[in-house]
Image (spheres, grey):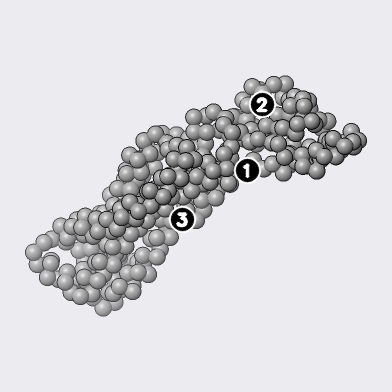
């Protein structure tokens, strides 16, 4: 495009296009990693335009192959003062344009890129913390009350199922109140930065996040309450809690893979797998230039709803027996046998 330099032998495959529309169409299809536009006055002004599908910190659109290719092309025609100056810094005037959420190429903004990285992380961490904190309150609360024999007295007046439901609502709400305080304290700081960087949120993200939170909380809360009822003390309960927290935050640990390819197989599988669906889907939805198909969100929520229902049924049966069991902590086969009883 523009005044093309002669093709050189480089590791990166280089393809020329007759015009920008043809190159842009190939880039949108995913046939290309990036597009470089070389104006006719490049040697004099040094201005370049680079187009990529994404400009986030983990994007695969690397500018180094372009720099190496330009140096080889410039040096191939002999050196003069202008070419020598341009070879020393061939991409000094290169602007990067990346697709935004509306499918339009826009000039990369360093402040916006930082917010584009922090926004998915903040949403995933907030959702993960809300679920984990609420669940941990349930796990440790049930274990503590069982250890102190308080639950024996309570069971004289209510059924195990009623107690389980009360725990899910009461202790869960206490944990969420704490998270709400954290959010209220962080909004003024983070919100101001997002406004200055002109950050945009996907449409309906608040409703989707609420749906994932409620279902994921029911899933983890049910499991943690059931497990808390079979432990004998707080220490055992906290050991189980570590594994639940790891599952919930696994997508955050692997967020580089998800943000680099929000529509890739790793991101898709993690957003459909119920234990990791909530945090993984938040990362995908908030990733720059990411458009998650509505059918994937629907399947993910359906699978999470089914998993939450099964977790609630499992915990109700385990909870009924585990509350009155003391001494030895049951192993997994014993817990599964309890869950199979009617």
Q: Nearer the viewer, residue 278 or 85?
A: 85
User: How dense is the environment of label 2, judged by Cα within 10 Å: few (below 14), some, or many (20 and up)?
Assistant: many
**Of the pair 299 and 209, the residue shown nearer to us:** 209
Quadrant of the rendered structure where residue 202 is? top left
Asked where in the image residue 49 lies, by quadrant, the reply is: top right
Work out whether mark 1 precedes mark 3 in sequence or the reverse, and give the earlier one. Answer: 1
The residue at the point 12 percent across, 70 percent down is 153
Residue under label 3, please give it. 250
Mark 3 and mark 2 lie on one chain; the one further toward the N terminus is 2
Q: Residue at x 41, y 45 (%)?
A: 191
Instruction: Residue 111: tell me if it is visible.
Output: yes
The residue indicated by pointer 2 is 23
Residue 90 falls left or right of residue 271 = right
- Report x, y in % for residue 89: 77, 42
Task: Give the alpha-carbon distance from disc 1 to disc 2, as whole Å.
Answer: 18 Å
Counting from the top left corner in percent of width and height, residue 184 is at 33, 51
215 to 75, vertically: above or below:
below
Between 79 and 7, which is closer to the camera in this rendering? 79
Q: Secondary structure at mark 1?
A: loop
- Looking at marks 1 and 2 on the same chain, the residue that comes earlier in the sequence is marked by 2
Q: Is residue 41 above or below residue 191?
A: above
Would residue 134 be visible to someone looking at this image? Answer: no
The crowd level at tag 1 (other Cα within 10 Å; few <14, some 14-19, many 20+) is: some
Q: Which quadrant is home to the N terminus?
A: top right
Identify residue for label 1.
60
Q: Is residue 145 left or right of residue 109?
A: left
Seen at 45% across and 37% down, the residue is 200
């Amino acid at each position: 495009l523009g005044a093309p330099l002669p093709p050189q032998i480089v590791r990166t495959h280089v393809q020329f296009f007759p015009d920008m529309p043809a190159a842009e169409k190939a880039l949108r299809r995913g046939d290309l990693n990036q597009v470089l536009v070389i104006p006719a006055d490049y040697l004099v002004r040094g201005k370049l335009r680079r187009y990529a599908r994404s400009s986030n910190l983990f994007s695969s659109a690397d500018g180094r192959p372009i720099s190496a290719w330009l140096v080889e092309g410039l040096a191939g025609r002999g050196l003069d003062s202008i070419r020598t100056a341009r070879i020393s810094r061939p991409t000094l005037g290169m602007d990067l344009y990346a697709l935004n959420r509306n499918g339009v190429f826009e000039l990369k903004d360093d402040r916006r890129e930082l917010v584009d990285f922090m926004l998915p992380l903040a949403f995933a961490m907030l959702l993960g913390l809300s679920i984990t904190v609420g669940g941990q309150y349930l796990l440790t609360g049930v274990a503590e009350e069982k250890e102190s024999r308080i639950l024996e007295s309570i069971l004289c007046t209510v059924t195990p199922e009623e107690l389980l439901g009360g725990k899910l609502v009461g202790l869960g709400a206490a944990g969420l109140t704490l998270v709400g305080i954290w959010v209220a304290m962080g909004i003024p700081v983070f919100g101001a930065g997002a406004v200055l960087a002109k950050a945009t949120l996907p449409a309906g993200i608040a409703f989707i996040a609420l749906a994932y939170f409620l279902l994921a909380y029911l899933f983890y809360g049910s499991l943690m309450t059931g497990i808390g009822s079979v432990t004998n003390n707080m220490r055992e309960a906290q050991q189980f809690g570590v594994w639940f927290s790891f599952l919930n935050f696994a997508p955050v640990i692997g967020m580089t893979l998800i943000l680099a390819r929000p529509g890739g197989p790793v991101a898709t599988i993690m957003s459909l797998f119920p234990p990791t669906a909530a945090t993984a889907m938040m990362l995908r939805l908030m990733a720059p230039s990411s458009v998650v198909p509505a059918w994937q969100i629907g399947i993910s929520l359906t699978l999470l709803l089914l998993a939450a229902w099964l977790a609630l049924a499992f915990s109700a049966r385990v909870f009924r027996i585990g509350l009155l069991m003391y001494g030895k902590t049951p192993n997994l086969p014993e817990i599964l046998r309890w869950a199979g009883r009617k």
